[in-house]
Amino acid sequence: MAHKELRLILKAVRAFLEQAAFPTIPSTSRSPLNSMKHSAYILASLFVLATSLGSVRMGNGIMTFDTVPGWGLGPDGKSVLGSTHGSVVIDKAGNIYTSANKGVVVFNPAGKVIREFIDEEHSSIHDMEIREEDGVEYIYGARNRGGVGIKFEALTGKIVLTLGLTNESGLALTALKPTAITIAPNGDIFLSDGYSSNIIFKYDKNGKYISHFGREGDGLKEFHTPHGMTLDTRYDPPRLLICDRNHLPIGRLLHYDLDGNFIEEAATRLYMPTSAAIQGDYVSVPSLDGRLYILDKNNSVVSVLGYNAHPGDSLYRIPQEDWVEGIFAGTHGSYWDKDGNLYVQDWNIDGRIMKLVRVKW
């Protein structure tokens, strides 16, 4: 942020405090109230400086993180992504893949773009998972605009499998609007039709339809926008962890077994959870209201990152010039690297991805 912009912000802070609800007293008074106003100005100014120029610390305990200002931006300081409504995954080499409306962009850990898959077939991937098979890393994607699930080589972008509507399901559907995808240990693929039928489809590793489950509603065993999904490896055997984003009253996480049977509500009262990423005994769950929850194996919230006090403010339509370091908006995707750092994507008109470095105590 330029010095001129900082001066304007600090001037606005001073003007706000002058209009704040402090009792009227002579300007020459040395009363505690004048000292309070002066102290408030200093604290507000320090906050502006911290959030504009440097890293912001967030979270608590072992789940405390520092932001990395400017990570992933181009040489001109602008986002290289274009609008984002997608996901993040990381390969064995530590490279970060994030999906934007235009396609998939790959960064190295320092935030430099190393390759891209920019074409119609890789566009509008809403969710991704990465998996090694026979020594090759593949990315599975739920491609919302195309109405399909895809599988492609992480290194080359070559698409090797496409999943779509099938008559074998017996459902009278005309199109899919997939929002999430994940893979069982045996290679079976789960594709959530979260923006349309609220049904989750199961295919074998070759893309052959096996079964489906779920229906729309706000009942215990019904889905209201199954927006995110991952394989929950915190348990043995692994199970599906599903982000039932719009389920009333406020949104929840669900566990289902790999045959599509309901197990439990894992967590409730998470406002609009969008996706989930597992590392060890912890899961990161972005929320569309501008925060990211971290839950332990008991599915208790142990840390909240990027808290946004005004979650309804525009969400997607916050341009880059209005981004605030350490404050999320429309938080949509996340992924852990091997060191426990997090990469977080916002649903954003200009395309926002952030790196959060885990604090080592």
Image: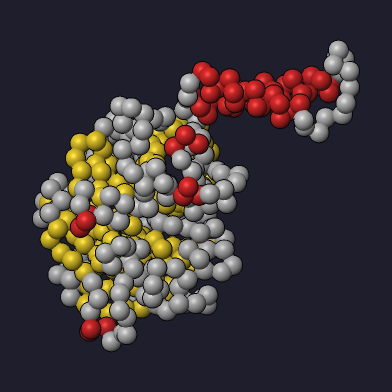
Q: Is residue 219 left or right of residue 37?
A: left
In the rendered image, residue 261, in percent from the top left (x then y), is placed at: 38, 77
Q: Nearer the viewer, residue 320 or 198?
A: 320
Is 49 above or below relative to 295?
above
Q: Nearer the viewer, residue 50 or 303?
A: 50
Q: Is residue 296 left or right of residue 122?
A: right
Write the residue at 12% across / 61% down. Answer: 160
In the rendered image, residue 48, in percent from the top left (x then y), is placed at: 57, 26
Which residue is situated farthest in the bottom direction here?
Answer: 170
Write the residue at 50% across / 49% down. Answer: 315
Residue 201 at least partly seen: yes
Write the residue at 48% across / 47% down. Answer: 317
Write the residue at 56% across / 44% down. Answer: 308
Quadrant in which residue 120 is drawn: bottom left
In the rendered image, residue 29, in percent from the top left (x then y), is placed at: 87, 15
Is 116 above or below relative to 213?
above
Residue 64 at least partly seen: no
How many discs mark residues in the rendered view? 0
Q: Is residue 162 left or right of residue 355?
A: left
Q: How is the image coloured?
A: secondary structure
In the rendered image, residue 207, in percent from the top left (x then y), is placed at: 18, 71
